[in-house]
Amino acid sequence: MPVNTNLSELRQEREFWTEVNEDVMKKESQEVFSKRKLAVDYYIDGLELKTIAEITDIRKQEVLRLVNRCRSFDENGNQVGYPALVPRFRMTSKSGKIEELFLRHPSLENYVAGNYFGDKKYTLEYRMNIRTLHSKFLQECLRIGVQDYEFPFNNKDKGYYTLRNYIKKLEAKHPDTIKRISKDARQRFNSTGYGETTSFKSIFPYDVVQIDGHKIDLLYSIETENEQGEMVRMTATRMWVIAIIDVATRAILGYSVTSRENYNQYDVLQAIRNSIVPHEKIHFTHDG
């Protein structure tokens, strides 16, 4: 399972993780565990991997591996949590409790997929979210006779994260996924065969940038050459600033300015160039 870059989801998952009694551990193991736990918590709290590595002396890739271990599932379908960080802790294979449940109750699998993908046989709700689906999933489990000592009721999170991960896998291979995304994405899918939405989320500088054009309303004059070759001054009523913005820090990496009625691809390319080439100090005509 790859590390989730949606930190809010990771923080929600962490609330259900099993804690570890460090008092019963040997000193050497306790030191290793404490350092690992600190690194994992720092990552989920949004600290940069480079900073975490400097503080804990744990390599960046190792931090990501430890987070993945905590998010693995035990034989009961619960996320392992902090015990996965204990030295020599043996990881069990992923249980697949929800798959076992569907094998015993085939109608339940159809119920989950039908609700999520908007099958009118099961629901009239458009684009049902996971929280609502989970609530209906539990109600249906009770209706068909799933006992309170069985999955999902024997889980701390009542099988929420197991259901969510199952839905993610289902989306990857289910043709009805296209019904849940935007109209523009569906049009792209129909014309190109690819309809996934792309949502860029970044927590690291220089990972993702945005390009925005901003119109500034102001009066100023510019010099231009007329048909007779004479230099004349003309009044301009607008100016465009095209900015290259770092998504993670919101810093302006570079920009370009144009007095045209609208900016074009050359103005965008100039802004990109200015964000890459080292900045040169501007020498103004008039001091101050």
Image (cartoon, rainbow, N blue to C red):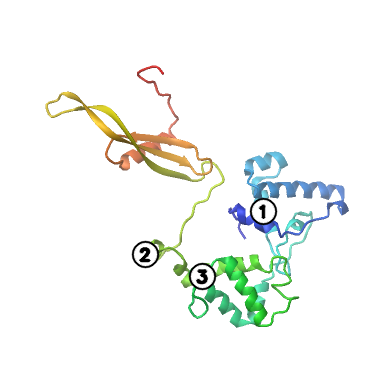
| Mark found first going from the N terminus, 3 or 2 | 3
**Quarter holding residue 53:** top right
Q: Which mark is residue 187?
A: 2
**Quarter holding residue 108:** bottom right
Q: Where residue 128 sits in the image (x, y, percent)?
A: 53, 68
Residue at 29% over, 41% down: 262
Q: Where residue 4 sits in the image (x, y, percent)?
A: 60, 56
Of 208 and 148, nearer the camera is 148
Q: Quadrant of the C terminus?
A: top left
| Mark found first going from the N terminus, 1 or 3 | 1
Q: Amino acid at mark 1?
A: Arg
- In the structure shown, which secondary structural element does the residue marked by tag 2 occupy? helix
Q: CA distance from mark 1 to mark 3?
A: 26 Å
Point out the frontmost of discs 3 and 2: 2
Task: Identify residue for label 1.
Answer: 65
Q: Quadrant of the N terminus?
A: bottom right
Q: Amino acid at mark 3?
A: Lys
| Mark found first going from the N terminus, 1 or 2 | 1
Residue 272's place in the image compared with 114, above or below, is above
Residue at 37% over, 67% down: 190
Task: Identify residue for label 3.
Answer: 173
Residue at 38% over, 61% down: 184
Let me know if residue 3 appears in the view. no
- In the structure shown, which secondary structural element does the residue marked by tag 1 occupy? helix
Q: Which mark is residue 57?
A: none
Looking at the image, do the residues carrying marks 1 and 3 touch, with CB atoms under 8 Å apart? no
- In the structure shown, which secondary structural element does the residue marked by tag 3 occupy? helix
Point out the frontmost of discs 1 and 2: 2
Looking at the image, do the residues carrying marks 3 and 2 touch, with CB atoms under 8 Å apart? no
